[in-house]
């Protein structure tokens, strides 16, 4: 919540400062704001320096402005690089012991990737990346992720998992955000982005292959979704496509919620047994019937008794629970 509020406040302050300077420049030149407004590097390296040069103590304001740009860029780069490094560490856990080396290799790699941006045609390469690398390639995976979590896996299941992991109750705000607001907002933004799409060579400043190169960059991340989905379906157990699709949609491990205030004791064995039963049943490996002996366990706010002698857990019970969650 703190990060969200700080990010929103930063955006508001930046918007106020940007349009204040644009309005000042338009007033000085006696033209409309749309004439002096520029997007991309022109706004930062042309419009703003001109405005700062007309302020008292321009060198001081220019120093503060570019230090701000440096810190913003550094913070964004650290967040992006940490995301990539986290994926690498999760895939190869043995590399966690060599974090400085891995981080150094990643930084050197990013340095060499950035060299073409500083050459004579660097501004054109920047325009291609700015138009395609941070647009469709980010929105489309985000839409798929929100739709799968909110509408396919289900908000109820996701909230139950969150409550179990964090030992807290998720509010209605987060339920509505995950299940309705975020998917619909991202779908609307994606549609508007496609509707407002304009090729880069529309003005004849870039060669015709620039848009093809941009779509190739965007498809590097977008194409990963159907490729790995197809691999997961192909490797799943089953003789028909429907069976493989159903099998691939189940998680590799099923979480069994632990009662709030649960105290470790003899009934841990019961929960462990229920966990394995749920996992085996969900994955369709075998049907299991378990007789759970009567167990008594203490809860922080009182004493509760669980008597489940000779109760069988089979496919029908889990199918019924699955329908309730849906």
Image (tube, grey):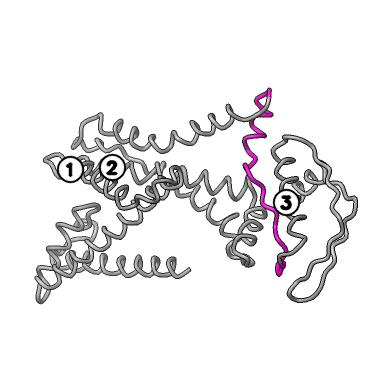
Q: Nearer the viewer, residue 119 or 136?
A: 119
CA neighbours of label 3 inside 10 A, class few (<14), some (14 to 19), many (20+): few
Cβ atoms at labels 3 and 2 below 8 Å apart: no
The quarter holding residue 129 reads: top left
Residue at position x 18%, y 64% in the image: 66
Of helix, strand and loop, which mostly describes the magenta segment? loop
Of pointers 3 and 2, the one earlier in the residue sequence? 2
Q: Is residue 159 left or right of 215 when viewed as pictured?
A: right
Residue 123 shows in this picture: no
Which SS class for mark 2? helix
Magenta-drawn stretch contains 243: yes
For residue 325, which numbered disc appears in the image? 3
N-terminal-most mark, 1 or 3: 1
**Along the horizontal axis of the image, is 152 left or right of 221?**
right
- Name the disc covering residue 129, or none: 2
Mark 2 burial class by Cα count in 10 Å: few <14, some 14-19, many 20+: some
Q: Is residue 24 visible?
A: yes
Q: Residue 310 magenta-drawn?
A: no
* Image: magenta residue range: 239-263
**Residue marked by disc 1:** 115
Q: Residue at x 19, y 40 (%)?
A: 124
Q: Are marks 1 and 3 in contact (CB under 8 Å)?
A: no
Q: Tell me where residue 219 appears, x and y as whole percent.
A: 39, 34
């Amino acid at each position: 919540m703190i990060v969200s509020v700080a990010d929103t406040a930063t955006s508001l302050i930046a918007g106020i400062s940007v349009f204040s300077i644009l309005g000042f420049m338009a007033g000085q030149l006696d033209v409309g704001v749309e004439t002096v407004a520029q997007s991309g590097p022109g706004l930062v390296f042309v419009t703003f320096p001109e405005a700062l040069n007309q302020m008292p103590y321009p060198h001081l304001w220019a120093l503060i402005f570019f230090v701000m740009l440096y810190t913003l860029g550094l913070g964004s780069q650290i967040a992006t690089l940490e995301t990539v490094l986290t994926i690498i560490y999760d895939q190869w856990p043995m590399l966690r012991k060599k974090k400085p080396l891995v981080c150094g290799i990643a930084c050197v790699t990013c340095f060499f990737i950035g060299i073409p941006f500083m050459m004579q045609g660097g501004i054109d390469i920047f325009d291609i990346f700015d138009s395609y690398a941070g647009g469709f390639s980010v929105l489309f995976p985000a839409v798929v992720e929100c739709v799968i979590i909110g509408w396919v896996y289900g908000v109820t299941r996701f909230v139950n998992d969150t409550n179990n992991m964090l030992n807290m109750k998720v509010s209605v705000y987060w339920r509505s955000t995950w299940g309705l607001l975020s998917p619909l907002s991202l779908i609307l933004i994606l549609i508007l982005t496609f509707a407002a799409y304009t090729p880069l060579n529309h003005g004849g400043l870039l060669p015709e292959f620039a848009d093809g190169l941009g779509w190739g960059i965007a498809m590097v991340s977008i194409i990963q979704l159907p490729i790995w989905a197809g691999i997961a379906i192909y490797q799943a157990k089953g003789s028909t496509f429907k069976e493989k699709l159903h099998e691939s949609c189940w998680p590799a491990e099923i979480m069994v919620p632990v009662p709030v205030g649960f105290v470790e004791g003899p009934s841990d064995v019961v929960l462990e047994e229920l966990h394995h039963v749920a996992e085996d049943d969900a994955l369709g490996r075998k049907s299991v019937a378990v007789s759970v002996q009567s167990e008594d366990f203490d809860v922080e706010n009182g004493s509760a008794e669980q008597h489940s002698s000779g109760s069988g857990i089979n496919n029908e019970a889990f199918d019924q629970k699955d329908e309730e969650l849906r």
